[in-house]
Amino acid sequence: MKTSDDRTFLLINPNTNAATTQRLQDTLRPQLPAGVRLDVVTASFGSHYIACESSHAVAAHACLQSWADYRLAHAGPIDGVLIGCFGDPGLFALREASSCPVTGLAEASFILAAQRGAFAIVTGGERWKPMLQRLANALGY
C-alpha cells in the first residue's frame, strides 16, 4: 500500500539499449531510501547509442514518447524524472510536458561539478563537444 511518504521516480533511457537501462537501474536502486520506487523505461525507437545531432534529436522524441506511454499506463503521481543519457535529450521539452521535476545525467553532473568551481567535460566523441557546450550554455554554465 502506498503511503503519503512513498515517492515514485521515473528513469527514462532515451536510447534503445536495454542493457544500458539495466546498468542504470542496477546502479541507482541500491542507493534509494525506503519508500522510494524507481520505475525504468527504455526508448521504443531511435538509436542504440546516441552519438550525433540526429540521434540526439530522435532520442528527444523517444524520451517524450516514453513519458507519454508511461503516463498512459501509470495514473499515479510521479515525483521526478531522470533522463538516463549524459546529453539530456528532450530535457526542456519534457519539463514543459510534465508537472514534476525533470533532470538529466548531464545537468545533475553540472550542478555537482559547479559547486566546486569551474569544470570541464571529457567526452568520448568529437560530435558531443558542440552538443554539450550548447546544453551547458542553455543551463547557465
Image (cartoon, rainbow, N blue to C red):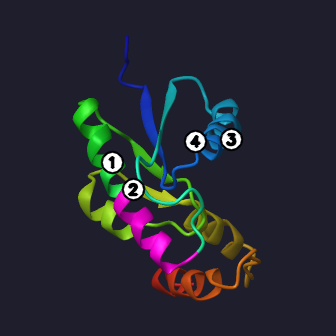
Using residue 5 as the reference point, say whether residue 48 is left or right of it: right
Using residue 97 as the reference point, say whether residue 85 is left or right of it: right
Q: CA distance from mark 2 to mark 3?
A: 18 Å
**Which of these two is toward me, 6 or 76?**
76
Main secondary-structure element of the magenta-colored stretch: helix
Q: CA distance from mark 1 to mark 4?
A: 16 Å
Q: Position of residue 119 (x, y in %)?
A: 74, 81
Q: Position of residue 121 (x, y in %)?
A: 72, 79
Q: CA distance from mark 3 to mark 1?
A: 20 Å
Is 136 rendered above or below residue 61? Answer: below
Q: Secondary structure at mark 1?
A: helix
Q: Counting residues from the N terminus, which is met first, the one under dot 3 or under dot 4?
A: 4
Is 36 rendered above or below residue 108? Answer: above
Q: Counting residues from the N terminus, which is met first, the one under dot 4 or under dot 2?
A: 4
Q: Secondary structure at mark 2?
A: helix
**Residue identifier under label 4:** 18
Q: Secondary structure at mark 4?
A: helix
How busy is the neighbourhood of tag 2: few (under 14 within 10 Å), some, or many (20 plus)? many
Which residue range is magenta in the image? 52-62
Is any part of residue 90 visible from this angle? no
Q: CA distance from mark 4 to mark 2?
A: 14 Å
**Residue identifier under label 3:** 23
**Residue identifier under label 1:** 67
